[in-house]
Image (cartoon, grey):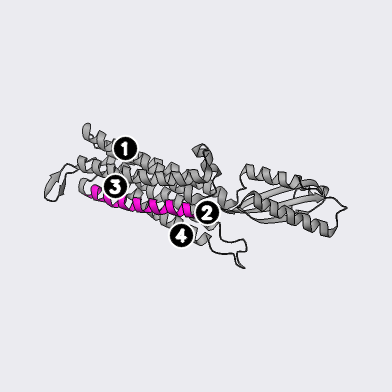
Amino acid sequence: MAHESSGAIYTAAGANLAIAVAKFVGAFFTGSSAMLAEGVHSVVDTANQVLLLVGLKRAAKPADARFPFGYGREVYFYAFLVALLIFLGGGAFAVYEGVHKLQHPEPAADAVILGRTVPGFIVNLAILGFAVLAEGYSCLVALRAFWDEKGRLPPITAIRRSKDPALFTVLVEDVAALTGLVVALAGVILAETLRQPAFDGIASIAIGLILIGMAVFLMIETHGLLVGEAAEPELVARLHEIVRSEPGVHHVNEVLTQHLGPADILVNVSLDMDDTLTAGDIERLVGHLETRMKQASRKVRRVFIEIQARHDAVRQPDPAPAG
């Protein structure tokens, strides 16, 4: 999984860096607001990929005395920073630039390239066409890696269930980038054909709103991972089945799971056991259960089993504070 995430991120970073340079060149020569907004968007995306790579590297650090469960959640923290950067550095700037363009509309300026004058409209179309090809390839790489991990679930469902923010963040970024490019193309074409430069500003605002919406979506998804999401429902149900099927288990009080990282699941189990079992029997049963649960998924790294009478496991409300 880490290899798939890293490959998609490196591809996206390279594509976005090349696209950013092309867009800024186009914006410099033509004065296009939508092109400038798209250039900033590509720079932000490139910085985001660097942050995700840093998060993946830090998440791979081994556990130590200070963090006995490891650093797996580092990638969740950096993914949240990425969403915040998209919101502020991409979306907010694009909206601001679009509003400024609406207040001061100017047609795209012609560009002088190698001593020849080229219409700004043609320059913008050429750059946006290159960006669509590069971004499309990056999106294809991310999509393949994502489907390899999640199968053929509906896209939104797959993203909601994914515990690898590095992978789904790149995918969502690429989809938003392609959408933004289509909007930028529409703005450039409408501004030229209708002789209305204001469409360039409108396109910039639309791009900003797309980025803000994407950033909010990523913040919501990453927030749940930061707080501590449970494992997939199918895996939780499988763990219940494993525990219930074990002879000597009278009642399963609870099975709690939590993702400590994209491929690191903590399992806590509370069981009511047969009172006639000896200490040795219980030790063997606990060891057998732990082995079976880890075999159920390679992501299950830690299993803690508590032996507790059923009536003692019923949770009582916390007492009200005195006074």
**Circle 2: element type:** helix
Which of these two is toward me, 105 or 75? 75
Q: Which residues are magenta?
A: 1-28
Task: From the image, state whether disc 2 or disc 3 is nearer to you.
Answer: 2
Of the numbered discs 1 and 4, the one sitting upstream in the chain is 4
The CA distance from mark 3 to mark 1 is: 13 Å
Task: From the image, state whether disc 2 or disc 1 is nearer to you.
Answer: 2
Q: Quadrant of residue 233?
A: top right
The outermost residue toward the top is 194
Q: Where does label 1 land, which residue?
A: 202
Q: Does the residue at mark 3 contact the one at mark 1 (Cβ under 8 Å)?
A: no
Residue 17 colored magenta? yes
Q: Where does label 3 land, which residue?
A: 36
Identify residue type, mark 2.
Tyr
Q: Position of residue 195 (x, y in %)?
A: 21, 33
Of the numbered discs 2 and 3, the one sitting upstream in the chain is 3
* Residue 300 visible in the displayed image: yes
What residue sits 50% from the left and 61% below the top?
A: 58
Residue 174 colored magenta? no
Q: Where does label 4 land, which residue?
A: 54
Q: Position of residue 1 (x, y in %)?
A: 51, 52
Q: Position of residue 313 (x, y in %)?
A: 78, 49
Q: Position of residue 180 (x, y in %)?
A: 35, 41
The CA distance from mark 2 to mark 3 is: 30 Å
Identify residue type, mark 1.
Ile
Of the numbered discs 3 and 1, the one sitting upstream in the chain is 3
**Circle 4: element type:** helix
**Circle 3: element type:** helix
